[in-house]
Amino acid sequence: MSTSQTAVHRGIVKQVLSGDAVVIRGQPKGGPPPEKTICFSNITAPRMARRPNPAQDNVETKDEPFAWEAREYLRKKLIGKEVAFVIEYTVPGTGREYGCVYLGKDTSGENITEALVTEGLVEVRRGGLRPDDPGQQQLIQLEDAAKAAGKGKWNTAEAAKHVRNVKWNVENPRNFVDSHHNKPIDAVIEHVRDGCTVRAFLLPSFDYVTIMLSGIKCPMFKQDESGKQVPEQFAAEAKYFTEVRLLQRDVQIILEGVSNQNLLGTVLHPNGNIAELLLKEGFARCVDWSMGVVTQGADKLRAAEKIAKEKKVRLWKDYSPSGPTVDIKDKSFSGKVVEVVNGDALVVKTGDNQFKKVFLSSIRPPRNTAASTDSESPSKSRIRPLYDVPYMFEAREFLRKKLIGKKVNVQVDYIQPANNNFPEKTCCTVTISGINVGEALVGKGLATVVRYRQEDDQRSEHYDELLAAEARAQKKGVGLHSKKEAPIHRVADISGDLNKCKQFLPFLQRAGKSEAVVEFVASGSRLRLYLPRETCLFTFLISGIECPRGARPLPGGQMSPSDPYGDEALQFTKEMCLQREVEVQVESMDKGGNFIGWLFVDNTNLSVALVEEGLAKVHFTAERSNYYKQLKIAEENAKRNKRNLWKDFQETTEPEEVVEDNTERNVSYKPIIVTEVGDDLKFYAQLVDNGPQLEKLMDQLRQDMEANPPLPGAYTPKRNDLCAAKFSQDNEWYRAKVEKVEGSKVTLLYIDYGNREQTTATNLATLSASFQTLAPQATEYCLACVTLPSDEDFKADAVDAFYDEVANRQLSMNVEYKVAGLEYVSLLNPDTKDDVALKLISSGYMLAEKRREKRLAKLVSDYMKAQEKAKSSRENMWRYGDFTEDDAKEFGYSR
């Protein structure tokens, strides 16, 4: 800007100080531009209120009537606009410059002084006006017209209503923030202290507040020894960036937290979030200490910072990643969890049969405290972290129960280099059904979040969600954050202790099948088990088989070679059993204090499974067991298929002997409620015992939705996501799984009831991780030992009859067998003890299925007898005779 007193100058209005003074800036050239304060000549505006200043008289002044209106008139007309101005004179001593401002590029634009006088918002100083100056005389005429019309300040009757009640200080910042409930508040930015700190008037209350932008920090202005403000690098540019966009603009502010007496918040301009823009341009960096309060998407701020880092702009001009980068092809993969290592690591089997050990990003598992370490007996030979570190066992169990054998998605966040004899770690975000495992673990108080140096970007991509989960756990006082005593696990390790094993043996033999957890697999037939009921550890040898041994360490650090297929047998047993809940049947023990017996995983005999895979041979000791025939059948199959140990086996031609299943039918009826009935005799049911737990969860879910109603359309459904859904029949919230998304239509499965529905995304909401921990309560089953008739009419009658018998009723259920993972069950009426399938067969609605398992022989026999009786009575589908006989083709029937 020129300093000539006669020239016409141009600039952009940066700030309106009052109704008769503005700050005009020039164009930026290599930095913030020069500025000039111009007071309007020949007029006086009402004085605005001033806050108490301790350095002066410390007295608060009030608005003169219409002072705010005059300031606002100029602000809305001029801020950010290009103007022309003429400096008419400069006051000696103070250097204050007076002149006239015109809207536009030259003096032909609107005269702002005349506009103010016309609106009655200022008073003309008549004492210094010259009678021969037509412009000055025009001001007098305009003022007289405004007075006659009672405009603005000349309407003295309304003067008292145009004085603001400004609240300069907030007495209780925390209560003040909470009272606004994270809702946007209209505001005008009055001052920009630096790039991330502003002062504003909240409207219409006129609270004067200092706002620090949540989640970010810009370079600051620091005071040197002489008291001069010295800017850090890019501090002036960051301040200008914020000023030019926010100063005296209409914005919305969301109050989110408190830091000392300053408020933390997000400033929303019509063009977006200023914090995101600052980060994207490299004028700011994310800070963890205030990121936790951000309500407008912490992930957006992190993404904006990432863009600036990649472009290496301003603050990031010398940026380089603080750790090794991850190849894009290795960035994500999926696999099955085969092992949980303590409380923060998993072993995942990928689709190409590779085993990868991954650590949960930014998670610190429970650690031994100094107090618990000091209290340990000096005679104790070694520490067992899993049982001795408080909450380590709970953390491992949480992960084990949720993940073992399940498919997970893994996103590699960073690689932690080897350090202090610790190997390199691949740190990842692991999700299952859309749930972040690390976030769920932290939310339960079973792990804490690692705190990083500000410049360290080697952290979880969901770091802010982890911090929020930790804050919730601290607030609830759960797990590691509980003030109660940590649970103690006194686990007796009786492995190799002959005397203790002898004491336990009779008890285990009498107990029959006992529940256990496989803690370690030493070889294909040698495992280490934990017995929860007795809180003891012991070594268990699989009975009835001869299994090759894998490589094992010898004294002196050497390794013994593996037997043929020993390593394969070890891997097979690991994948099938490790860290799974199993049933063991102890028969005897050896001289070394190891128990010998049978082990079952999901009703599968491990001995039989190993033999069937050709990874073990039947041992002669199995001849006197109940499982000998199963073992022999499995071995014959392995020989016939030339599996592993039998790859060179030459089969001798002998007449085949049909061996049927000799196991006894296992009868253990459980009370269920059938919630949904489908076609082909499939249905969904809930266990009655789990009813109270589900009702409690539903109540909590609906209370949470009522207290924090979701924004319609804010949730974007994805296939296989778990979400909250509003059921169309009763408008209540339930847990659901997204099965299909077609445009605006979403197909859901209500996982606790089994029914399906097509709805829109507006009826869906994000399901908090705390509501995803309970397993789906509706399980799919199918009616056992029966089939439907092939005729479509008869089939429809059968499905209707089945629905009438079971829908929404409490029944007793027994699992008879599994096919492709689906459990086939028999159902009883608990009051009459009537078999549902038997009743439907007797009524001529269904056909009995001829199954060959010996354990089902009696059940199938009863069903066949009922079918014959229905035939002879010509019930329903038998009313035209036996359509299953040879001549049935004449009537169009076929089986």
Image (spheres, helix red, strand yellow):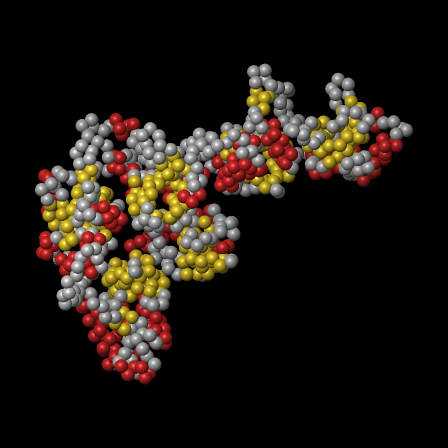
Q: Is residue 65 left or right of residue 505?
A: right
Q: In the image, residue 213 lies at what x, y percent?
A: 54, 34
* Number of numbered markers: 0
Q: Nearer the viewer, residue 481 or 119?
A: 481
Q: Quadrant of residue 103?
A: top right
Residue 809 against residue 383 in the figure, above or below:
below
Q: In the image, residue 572 lies at what x, y percent?
A: 24, 49
Q: Identify which residue is drawn at 20% across, 67% down.
A: 852
Q: In the image, residue 158 lies at what x, y percent?
A: 73, 37
Q: Is residue 478 left or right of residue 232?
A: left
Q: In the image, residue 100 lies at what x, y percent?
A: 79, 31
Q: Identify which residue is drawn at 22% across, 68% down.
A: 851
Quarter of the rendering occupied by the C terminus: bottom left
Could you tell me if residue 804 is visible in this image?
no
Q: Identify which residue is drawn at 53% across, 32% down.
A: 316
Residue 589 against residue 862 in the figure, above or below:
above
